[in-house]
Amino acid sequence: MHFPQKVAVLGAGLTKFMRRAQETPKELAFEAAKMALDEAGLTIDDIDAVVLVTAPDAFDGVHMNGEYLADGAGGSKKPYMRSFVGGGSGVFGIINGWYHIASGHFRTCLVVAEEKMSSSMPHPQGTFNAIYDQFTERPLGVNLLWIFSLEMNRYMSVHKVPLETIALVAKKNKKNGLDHPCTQAGIAGDYTVEEIVNSEIMCWPVTRLMVSTVSDGAGALVLASEDFAKKVTDKPIWIEGVGWCLDTSYWTNRDLYYPKYVEYAARMAYDMAGIKDPRKEIHVVEPYDPFAYKELHHLEGLLLADKGEAPKLLEKGFWDRDTETGIPSSPSGGLLGVGNPIAAAGLMKVAEIFWQVKGTAGKRQAKREVKRGLAQAWGDLMQVGTVVILGK
Amino acid sequence: MEFKGKSLKDRDFKEKNILYTDWHVKAHYAWDCGVALSKFFEGLKEGKLYGRSCPECGRVVIPPRMFCELCFKPTDKWVLLKDEGRINTFSVSYVNTDASRREKPNVPAVIEIEGASEGMGILHLVAHPEKIEWENLEEVLSMIKIGTKVKAVWKPSNEREGAITDIKYFVPVKEE
Amino acid sequence: MFEKIEKFDKIRVWKGEKTGWHRYTYGIAGEMFFRKLMEKKFVAGKCPECERLFIPPRIYCEDCFVEIKEFVEIKELPRVYSFTFLFKDLEDNLLKEPEIVVFLKWDNIEGGLIHRLKEVNIEDVNFGLVVEPVFKEKPEGNINDILYWRPKK
Ligand SMILES: [Zn+2]
Ligand SMILES: [Zn+2]
């Protein structure tokens, strides 16, 4: 594959993640975008194009939310696009930003992700339920948890994974989240496996502490071409690979135990990055973890563990932040430990990999040497995998 | 680095520390069922489950569709399926559709329908074979697991309206 | 694959609805604007870079993309920048007398407000007409704290 330009990441920004933010969606977008520009040492005049991602309009409660957000995202009077793959949007936005520049058409691109779920009342659940088929599923009285607990049960049963092992993901991520400056109040903590397993049964096998929360927040990344990046930094972080893939939305016809579409997305990104053995060449990973089992599900889809092996590696501490021989997974704290403002949560994962590779993740910095990392998001109608690989 | 954001509490709204405005939405939809699902629902009204087959890969799919998404060719035959199948996966839900909590759980499941190709499931509910309502998690886990055979329980024919809810639920049945 | 529909009773539809509501906070700038409006005052935000004023105020200048921290009270009255007459309500019923909707702008300030204009003859509505607000007695912190605008007395 040949692309006219290599693409670098120059800066990242995030707002705090909050259950209810006072800021409007535009204000959240501005704060994150401005912070990313500041880290990059650029102003809005340096930005050639803007990409915006946000999940369904019904969360923010603004019809055509992408258009509404344009000025807050820095897109006023600029080539601007909103892209969308539901929960996978945070990483998909980076992919869209990447091809704006890789094509050779733009020198720079600001990618902004925003979500204000608290606007949706009485609970965002009502909006989530619309993902189900209106003819054959919604009349049954669905809720969003069903699909996750069904998938989790299938995954656990096929691989015979105990609930206690899955709880270790929540334990790890909620502990990691204590060190993230944007962590939503009341989410991170040093929980025991017992507390997680014995927390309120919401939709068995999913318990309260194995589910990420509803959040408000925003994130942003500044991307630039090789030519541009080399003028402003001598240590650019590169986007080495991108991949994405959607499976059918007839989800009851798929075997839910394995996310094949995540594998296809990962293979696309590995090929582009020239990665032959991801388990050796990926040094830190941020898989999408809206639910505890999802992290394991995705680590296997990303080919970082054999099918059914991610839980065993978890028990051995292979995915811990201070591992010396394993691959730290969700060192940020992830969606379980920081919060889940959908599109912004996915972008937060890319920001974490950026800071990890750059070596500026502070207390969250992986112990082992990090030259390359991977961020992945997931969503749409339970069918999309989006992958970005960053490296020195 | 300074991370911005002003976090609010429910109290701030109750005590009017904060200004806000509410916008009530009530949108009504009438979705055309389309070609495949119209026939499917006609079948349900008669107490029958129909799948659709693909001439290229030979799959029999349910819910039925007029195209095979794998071969990307039109499907061409209606296939009458049995109103029974096996649990592909299930969960035990204490949460209602509006996120409020249930005292007693219900059991959503993906049910692989007998007569369709392997792995072809639909979403439905599984009820207790005698009491209908489940008492608790333990009771559910003692009676069903992945692979359990289940059979549809239909509404009386005069109450059916051509909807997925014409099947009231599935119940576990003994293996012959 | 497609057949002409001849029997309309054979068309199946499934009906559903989306209920619920949205709760919007006014944001950092909006909170300030509406708090001041409750005191019958109008504030604009001032960009530190281009020095333009914006109303309603916002916490950023979308062109300079810098934070706006300075908010100033506007004592002048706005003018009618554009207007339209409504003859029918949302249900398509003819109104007894037309409603006047105006876009108001202040001189040398970016942005403006959409609102109602009353106490005026239709013939007298024109571009540049200076107008003053008529406030509700008990303000609630929303745009309807201004009942309507009327020509400056
Ligand atoms: Zn086929
Ligand atoms: Zn300015």
Image (tube, coloured by chain):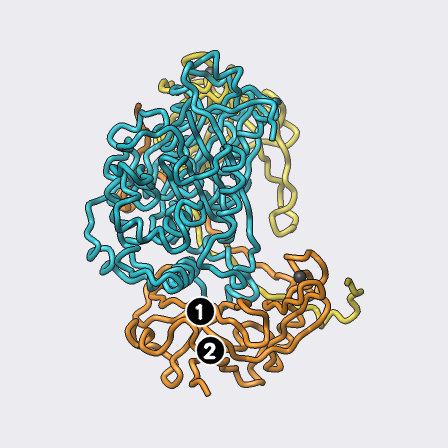
Chain colours: A cyan, B orange, C yellow
Q: Say which element carries label 2.
A: strand
Q: Quadrant of the N terminus of chain A?
A: top right
Badge 1 crowding class, 10 Å Cα cut-off, few under 14, some 14 to 19, many 20 or more, is many
Instruction: Look at label 2 and name its amino acid.
Output: Phe
- On screen, residue B164 versus residue A222, left or right, reads right
Q: Say which element carries label 1.
A: strand
Instruction: Look at label 1 and name its amino acid.
Output: Ala
- On screen, residue B149 versus residue A193, left or right, reads right
Q: Quadrant of the C terminus of chain A?
A: top left
Quarter of image, res B45: bottom right
Quarter of image, res B96: bottom left
Identify the residue position indicated by label 2 in the image: B170
* Towards the viewer: B135 or A91: A91
Kindly check if marks 1 and 2 are in contact, taking CB atoms under 8 A apart as contact. yes
**Position above or below: C137 against B131:** above
Label 1 beta carbon less than 8 Å to ligand 1: no
Residue A315 in sight:
yes
- Residue sitting at 67 percent across and 57 percent down? B71
Q: Which chain contains the residue that carries disc 1?
A: B
Residue A117 in the image: state x and y as whole percent. Answer: 40, 45
Residue A255 in the image: state x and y as whole percent. Answer: 49, 61
As drawn, the label of residue B109 is: 1
- Residue sitting at 47 percent across and 75 percent down? B86
What is the CA distance from the residue labelled 1 to the residue labelled 2? 9 Å
Q: Which chain contains the residue that carries disc 2?
A: B
Q: Residue furthest bottom?
A: B176
Of pointers 1 and 2, the one earlier in the residue sequence: 1
Q: Are marks 1 and 2 on the same chain?
A: yes
